[in-house]
Image (cartoon, helix red, strand yellow):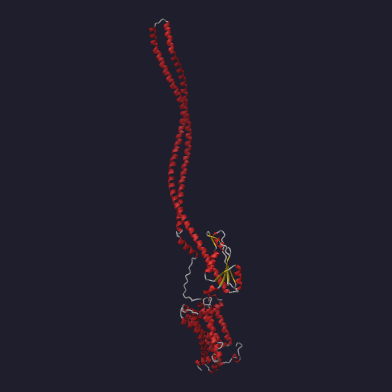
Amino acid sequence: MKVPQMITAELRRLTSTRMSVIALIALLAVPILYGGLYLWANQDPYGNLSRVPVALVVDDAGATLNGQDRNLGDEVADELLDGDTFEWHRVDADAAAAGLENGDFDFTVELPSDFSDAIASISTDSPRQADIELRTNDANNYLASTIGTQAVARIESTVASKVIDEAGLTLLNALQTIRMKLTDAATGAQQLVDGLGTAHDGAGSLVDGATQLADGTAQLRDGAATLRDGAAQVSTGAEQVAAGTAQVDAIADRVSTAAAGAAALLPQARTDIAQRLTDAGLDQAQIDQVLGVLDPVGQRLTDANTRVQTASEQIDQLSAGAQQVSTGAQQVASGAATLAGGTATAADGAAQLRDGANSLDGGLGQLVDGATQLQSGLADGVAQIPDTDDATRNAQASTLSDPIAVESSAVTAAQNYGAGLAPFFAALAGWIGIYALFLIVKPVSKRAVTALNTPVRVTLAGWLTPALLGGIQMLGLFGVLAWALGFSFANPLATLGILLFASATYAAIVLALNVWLGSVGQFLGLVLMVLQLVTAGGTFPWQTLPGPLAALHHVLPMGYVVDAMRQVMYGGDISRVGLDLAVLATWLVGAGIVAAIGVGRMTRFRTLRDLQPSLIG
């Protein structure tokens, strides 16, 4: 009996009755239904999150933010309700709690009454975080809780971006105002430097003038002292002159009086002489002659009296002048003494002024240096603060609130969530399909084993039958993925080829288990499927597995099927497919050899299992 005949005989057995045909068709449909339905259900779950009911509770009372009355809770609610991330329902706290408990809502999000106030506290002395309360109920759906956490993180990010944007704009505007003020201050500082420079130059001139003044007042002080001494001497002499002129004036007064008296007696004396001459018997001519002789003497006496009176008046004036000179000399002496004291004080003050001017000059020099440093520092500060317009500041604030733009570039990319899971579930469906087929397919024909002594041909026929049927399963599954679900394939023929090769490898493995262990081997095929389910790395990266399971990932074939399908389906590194196929080929050949050895043992020996039915049907 040849291999094709053995395959034909097995297929004839599988289709001998209507019920057998139905059973065969049902088992052939198992991987198609499993892989197709699962991937259909998970084709694009993230694209349908807008159907997930979520309660939104907003109790925010609002607050004053940046000088404006704001209610960030209402603003966030409006954005969420206008979006399509979830099926948002704005309700009160009681309705949200009741809906979460009875399953009307998958999770609830609450913005408390102090939400805006907490955000506004950023600019106060007591900043605090704003709360967003997320309530979940894993009894409704565990993944809904995970999605809710991500949703709250998005809300947090949105609010933070809004607040940072506004706060950043306020800060940038304040910086621009500071820059303008610093510019004014720098200009004023420059004016101060210029003014202080002028003052410093003036202080230098003041030092020179104060030095000259100090020298002059010192000389004046010395001269005033000399003047004081001379004035004192003049005052003493003037007093003596005044006293002498007073005595002369007294003598002159007596002489004047005597002269005046003598002059006053002349007329009477002339008359008396004329009378006595008359009485003496002289005639008038004689009397006139005598009087003519006496009249010149009287005239001289009168003239002398006049001169005496004039001299007396002059002496009076001289005495009065001497008295005035004495009084003036005393005043001059007193003034000179006062002047000497004042000039001494002025000299001391001028010396102090000179010293102060020197200190002022040095201080102004330091002040000029300090003002220059101030102006330079202000100018540097102005240069370090960028001069921006309103549009630039708005752009800067927007960038500050969202500083990172994630540019995603993928070497390969799955079409959607379902396409991302397709390699894993297609590989798993292939194993499930082979496992199901061996429920009705006989691993090895006992008749062929008895009639033929050719273990290789019997093994090949026992493998080809489920491998061909598995190929039909994979063709059907590929058709569902490509046409029914619309998944795209970078290398469709290579993808189909890997599915067929994987199914053939699975058939060899399950065949070997059945040949050696019978029904127990069939059960171990189920156990092996479970191990590969968790170690293939089809969902989470295999690196997240515990150590022993991670080690199995490198040994069991399904992980290599998943990797090979990902490369050919998404357009990845085709060179990696060679290693994957080499591992699968090793499993295929190794399992075939093991199965052939088992079949050879069956041709030579009969075991208790051959004589006694297995406990597992």
Foreground of the two, 397 or 553: 397
Q: Is residue 498 left or right of residue 114?
A: left
Task: Please determine whether, in this image, residue 406 is positioned above or below residue 445.
Answer: above
Q: Residue furthest top?
A: 281
Question: How many numbered tags mark residues here?
Answer: 0
Foreground of the two, 26 or 427: 26
Q: Is residue 237 visible?
A: no
Task: Please determine whether, in this image, residue 256 is positioned above or below residue 597.
Answer: above
Q: Is residue 90 left or right of residue 304?
A: right
Residue at horizontal 54 percent and vertical 95 percent from the top: 451
Residue 378 picture location, percent across and down: 46, 55
Foreground of the two, 299 or 232: 299
The quadrant of the rendering that contains the C terminus is bottom right
Q: Is residue 142 visible?
A: yes
Residue 453 picture location, percent across and down: 53, 93
Residue 607 picture location, percent across and down: 59, 91
Residue 315 picture location, percent across and down: 44, 22
